[in-house]
Image (cartoon, coloured by chain):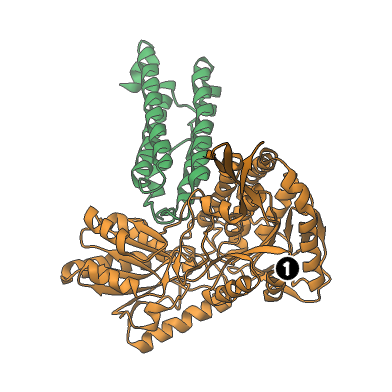
Chain colours: A orange, B green
Amino acid sequence: MPVLEEPIKEVLKLKNYINGRWVDSKSEKVVDVRNPATQEVIAKVPMSTGDEVAATIRAAREAFPEWRRTPPLARARCLFRLKELLEENFELISRIQTMEHGKTIDESRGETRRGIEMVEVATGIPSLMMGYNLEDIASGIDEYVIYQPLGVFAHIAPFNFPFMVPLWYSPFALATGNTFIVKPSPRDPISQVKLAELFDEAGIPPGVYNLVHGGAEVSGALIRHPDIKGITFVGTSKVGKDIYQKCGEMGKRAIVQGAAKNFMIVMPDANTSATIPALMTSFFGNSGQRCLSGANLVIVSEEDIFYNKFLDAFVTAASKIKVGYGLDESIQMGPMQSVDGKERVLSYIERGLSEGANLVLDGRQPKISGDYPDTCFIGPSVFIDVKPEMIIAQEEIFGPVAGVLRAKDLDTAIEIANRSRYGNGNAIFTSNGKSAREFQYRIESGNVGINIGIVAPMAFFPFGGMKESFMGILHGQGRDVIRFFTESKVVIQRWF
Amino acid sequence: MTLNTASEVISLSRKLEEESKSFYQALAQRHPELSEHFLSFAKENEKYTREVERVYYGVITDALEGGFTFRIEPGDYRISTKLQEEISLARAIGAAIKMEEKLQKFYMDSAEQSKSLMADIPRAFAQIVRKRQNRIEELRAMVVMNLNRHEFRSSVY
């Protein structure tokens, strides 16, 4: 199958977007951005200097007073224009994601759509930001609450959803009257550059939305700066804990979404033919690089017949997944985003073997469709005989590796899942309402799926997360994020 | 080669509509007396493509099984769109009906297989199935209307 046309035809030299202008970085540290499928360098991204970070924050701070005075309806209109521009550039943005990240074109389009949905929801800000009031809290005295923006917020973005995740925050931050700085992942920053171009074209005033490239140093500078009122972060729990702690020490707000180890529990009464495709997407979609990816498959069955039959269907389907370059429309799984990512997965496979798990599907030598270097490619892998105490059952592998466990009943399955230190997106597959209700009630997971393999909340619901998968009080998306980006001011008034 | 991804199926839909459109455009040129009908079919094909794409781009989400939903064999829906030089109108309409039935089957199968995706997608496919049924009936009516003509009698029956 021929590949779709690549939108990036020459090596891009990426710039920062500060105060409404595209600015070359003076940094000498520049990192290559590679297309993980072809290994071609497609961009060069600067690790911005401290001065550049400071200039970005200054621009955002100075833009704040006027932006917060802009009526919410006018702010929403900017977002309506942004939404239109995103629709016009839908395919371009999607193909860029496939080129910078490696995901399949269907996955990239799905990510673009999800990102646009955030903008759509944020356009409702005149209603979403309303406070409330009560007359006569005492005789002749009224009380009301007003939600006000706080100032400058920054987002430190992950590599796995380079376009969508920053949009969990930026449209809401802007809609509520804050100003915003995004630091894209240096591994795949190009779709964020395109997004910043569209923010600019949508008429967002200078300084209101800014983009600064860089790595850990830039993140640190953003976190430490006193003018930054809050940080949103999606990434590993280890880094997340550090960010959360620093934000706490400095009295900043933080939304920290961390790692996961998600359990997919399959009951003997599950609809197998509908469950298998859902599990393929869950375990192997985005090459397993999702915080909502299935990681452990728990087949609930005391009898060998169902266990063996379901396992066979699962492994057979996984073995048929077509691996290759995501711009080929027939591809079902792209490469890992980076060599590091692939090596991490390989090391976990070794670990699983040494722990005594049985590798019944080995993705280490994948069949790649098309003539592409195998640098970042890895195929679906399935371990069986996995025990809950094994490292491969506990730690996030963040790749296309499924560990299959077996439980005698639902109680045992829930107990195994709840032993995890993470609680991000667990799901049950069943036709039994009582089992589903029991699971929903007892599972320690911020997002719960019932016959859904990827429990990704829509833009108007908060993106949950529990235990070490989440640090903070308010979550991204939905009403939570509106509260996160606003301070509630209570007014009590009496007129003499 | 089986098509598994939503993207592939949308592309196949686009290709089939394009081929079918060319067929009707050629037919309209060959038979000016019915060109209005045939050109309206060609125009409708463009509309179907737009509708399918609008729905796909509008609700595609990587959270559902877009990459693992379909088992479409493109060979099952290959349509013949070449008009032979000497083909009679009756035979050409017969070919059109066959083509429409194949396209209808494609959309029927796609609707059935995409039920686990956002409901808009199978609904859009199902709608095209219904519209194609109307078209098939219209084509059959053309045959009936022209039954008296010798050309039709000899070539259809």
Q: Residues within 10 Å of mark 1 (few under 14, many from 20)?
A: some
Left or right of A180? Residue A402 is: left
* Residue A280, placed above or below residue A359: above
Q: Nearer the viewer, residue A377 or A342?
A: A342
Residue at the top extreme?
A: B148
Q: How far from the left and from the top, in percent, is residue A397?
A: 46, 76
For the C terminus of chain A, the quadrant is top right
Left or right of A35? Residue B100 is: left
Residue found 37% across the figure and 59% down from its top: A448
* Residue A155, placed above or below residue A379: above
Q: Nearer the viewer, residue A467 or A49?
A: A467
Three-letter amino acid code at disc 1? Pro
Left or right of B2? Residue A124 is: right
Q: How far from the left and from the top, in percent, is residue B141?
A: 37, 17
Q: Which residue is mark 1?
A: A226
Q: Nearer the viewer, residue A85 or B131?
A: A85
User: Element at badge 1?
Assistant: loop
Q: Is residue B150 visible?
A: yes
Residue found 37% across the figure and 29% down from its top: B130
Residue found 67% across the figure and 50% down from its top: A174
Give me the chain letter of mark 1.
Answer: A
Q: How far from the left and from the top, in percent, is residue B138?
A: 39, 20
Left or right of A189? Residue A471 is: left
Q: How far from the left and from the top, in percent, is residue A372?
A: 56, 70
